[in-house]
Amino acid sequence: MTDENPFAPPTPRAAVPPANEPTPAAGRPSEPTGAPAQQPAAAEQPTEQLPPQHPAPHHPAPQHQPTQQLPATGYLTTLPAPSTAGHDAHSGAASHPGTASHDGTGPHDGGTPHGTTPYGTAQPPRSRRGRLGAGAVSAVVLLGLLAGAGGGVGAYALLDSRGSARPADAALPQPASGTSQVERPEGSVAAIAAAALPSVVSIEVRAPQGVATGSGMILKSEGYILTNNHVVAEAASGADVTVTFSDGHEQPAELVGATPDYDLAVIRVEETGLEPLVLGDSDDVVVGDSVLAVGSPLGLEATVTTGIVSALHRPVKAGESAEAAFIDAIQTDAAINPGNSGGPLVNSAGEVIGINSAIAQGPGTTTATGNIGLGFAIPSNQARHTAEQLIETGTATFPIIGVLLDPSYQGEGVQVSKEAQQGAPAVTPDGPADQAGIKPGDVILSVDGRPVSVADELIVAIRAKAPGDPVTLQVRSGKNEREIRVVLEERSSGQ
């Protein structure tokens, strides 16, 4: 093997003179015959001289071959062999070098096999002598094999004799016998990932204004998939939804139901026998629990990242103001990036404890810039309740107490507006708060013992409950504080 360019045209071998012609003596030029040879012109470029005992054969000047360019995509690609550029054996016409069709073959008339002369090098005419018999061919092949073996032995012997010129021994250390087996016990990150990945999908939504991508998890074996509303929001306007499964096959999906209030949606594919993930109990989650985030960040399917639960009950407002989702979120430092939306957050038991939905943005930024260690997931208990409603009715409900809040209030707690806003009363007549005795201007200090200091915290704390649930509010009216029991009222998304 040499270090020459393997794609260069082969160098023509010197022609051997016929046996009946005299061979010039070694080291002495042939006697001149006829007129003396002309002296070369001074302007001519020097040519490479062949050894005197083998006169150089006459060949037509080699034609310039164009350089093949690699594809611009950046992927490794197998290039097709260039077309034959030698003489056609039947017509005698030379094919055009350097041309190639889309399938890697050049123009031909059916006489010359493709690729017989690699890379356009001219092929000398074939000898018209009789063909060798089968025995002679076998002998030539055997001789060639023996010569190759002998040459190899000779080359190694030469390297051995040169001592220091022999390349160094490149053998690298090997792992000790029996120590290379990696243990992946049940509950390890690898084991949890292997169990979760087959049930996580990638989602693509094609709308006139562009393409949105996200993640999802198989919810039921009958083809139900849970994801974020903001991933498939355009499906409500007729956009096409395509689901890609872990084994690479794709299925079109239809929207079953969605709610912007919790940023959740359910879609369905016409497929059965799918393996769903189990929704765990998010009320059992504690800060410090190990978690895995699974999804397709930036379109990179089947990506797993690890971290811990960093905090609980983070009030997260996601989306546009008109359709903002208020999430009583689980915070995690597991890497979450755009495209992870709708994918599961899995605990060490392999159960889903949250649906990845949002990431924090740095001060002054208006668009998501990627993971900064502050990701947020919708708790699984909320996801379960909402998903069941979407599957059964196509819509979801959320709880309210029936008050308007004053966003300009500065102080402890959250203040009920003192007056009507845009024609709506500060306290809804006959609503839960009105029936419990809450008045305009009252300040709500806590919900079930959980302090609230901004409006979003109060809304999120209420949204974390279910319609019909009772809650205990700590309320201050003037200088008096009291506890009030309120039964939450139901409202449907879009109302």
Image (cartoon, rainbow, N blue to C red):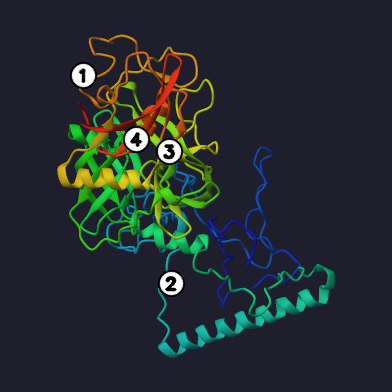
Q: Identify the image quadrant of the C terminus.
A: top left
- Dot placed on the residue nearer the N-terminal end, 1 or 4: 1
The image shows residue 72 at horizontal and vertical percentages of 45, 41
> What residue did someone put label 4 on?
471
> What residue did someone put label 3 on?
329
Q: In this view, does 68 lie to the left or right of 107?
A: right
Circle 2: residue type: Ser
Which one is in front, 87 or 227? 227
Q: How far apart are marks 3 and 1 (CA)?
A: 31 Å
Which one is in front, 138 or 122? 138
Q: Which mark's residue is nearer the viewer, 3 or 4?
A: 4
Circle 4: residue type: Val
Q: Is residue 426 left or right of residue 87?
A: left
Q: Can residue 138 be seen in this view?
A: yes
Mark 2 touching mark 4, by CB under 8 A?
no
Disc 2 packing (10 Å; few <14; some 14–19; many ≥20)? few
The image shows residue 413 at horizontal and vertical percentages of 46, 22
Instruction: Say if 242 sits above or below 491 in the image.
Output: below
Q: Distance between the residues labelled 2 and 3?
A: 84 Å
Q: Distance between the residues labelled 1 and 2?
A: 108 Å
Mark 1 touching mark 2, by CB under 8 A?
no
Q: How far apart are marks 3 and 4 (CA)?
A: 19 Å
Q: How far apart are marks 1 and 4 (CA)?
A: 19 Å
Which of the numbered marks, if any, corresponds to residue 127? 2
Q: Which mark's residue is nearer the viewer, 2 or 3?
A: 3
> What residue did someone put label 1 on?
429
